[in-house]
Amino acid sequence: MKKGTKSSTSTSQIVRDFAANNPTLKASEIIRELTAQGHKVYPALVSQALRGPADKKPGKKRGRKPGTKNKVVAAARTAKSPKAAPTDTSFGNLKAAADFIRSSGSAESALQAIRDYQKIAALVNG
C-alpha cells in the first residue's frame, strides 16, 4: 500500500471517539455499531483502545514496590532474634533455617554459630 493512502485517523482513535460520544455502550455494542458503519473492529482492538496508554496510569507497575523486603529475609531476621518462639514451625521459619544452614556451610557450623551468638548475647545482656 502506498504511503498516504490510509485514512488519517487510526481505528483505535475511531473507537475512542465513538466510546466518548456514547459512554453507556458496552464493548460488544461498540463493535456492532462500528462494524455497521464499515470499520474493521474486533473485541481485542476495542478493549485495547478503551484501556488507554499504560504510561498515563500511575501505580500500575509490576513487581515489588520499592522499599519492601522479601518475606524470607524478614522471617530469617525474626528467627535469629532471641524473642522468636522455638516452637514456631511455620514454613517461613523452616525456609529461613534452611537458608541459614546453607549459608553457614553445614548444620554443625550453623549450630556452633548459634551457640556463639548465645554466649555473646549472655555477655551483653549481663
Image (cartoon, helix red, strand yellow):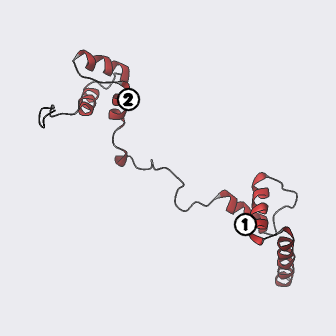
| Disc 1 target residue | 77
Residue 95's quadrant in the figure? Answer: bottom right
* 70, above or below 30, in the image: below
Q: Quadrant of residue 74?
A: bottom right
In the displayed structure image, the side of residue 106 where residue 40 appears, left or right:
left
- Crowding at label 2, few (<14), some or many (≥20) Cα neighbours within 10 Å? few
Q: Is residue 90 above or below residue 23?
A: below
Looking at the image, the residue that sits furthest to the front is 1
Inspect the image, locate mark 1, and give the three-letter code of the amino acid beneath it.
Arg
| Quadrant position of the C terminus in the picture | bottom right
| 68 or 48, nearer to the observer | 48
The earlier-in-sequence mark between 1 and 2 is 2
- Give coordinates of residue 105: x percent, y percent: 78, 71
Percent x, y of residue 10:
22, 33
Residue ID at (24%, 33%)? 13
Residue 44 is labelled as 2
Tag 1's secondary structure? helix
Does residue 15 appear left or right of residue 119 in this picture? Answer: left
How far is the residue under mark 1 from the one under mark 2? Answer: 47 Å
Q: Amino acid at mark 2?
A: Ala
- Kindly identify the residue that appears in the image at 32 percent across and 21 percent down: 31
Label 1 packing within 10 angstroms: few (<14), some (14-19), many (20+): few
- C-beta proximity under 8 Å, tags 1 and 2: no
The x and y percentages for residue 100 are 76, 66
How far across and down, in percent of the image, does residue 55 sit? 35, 49
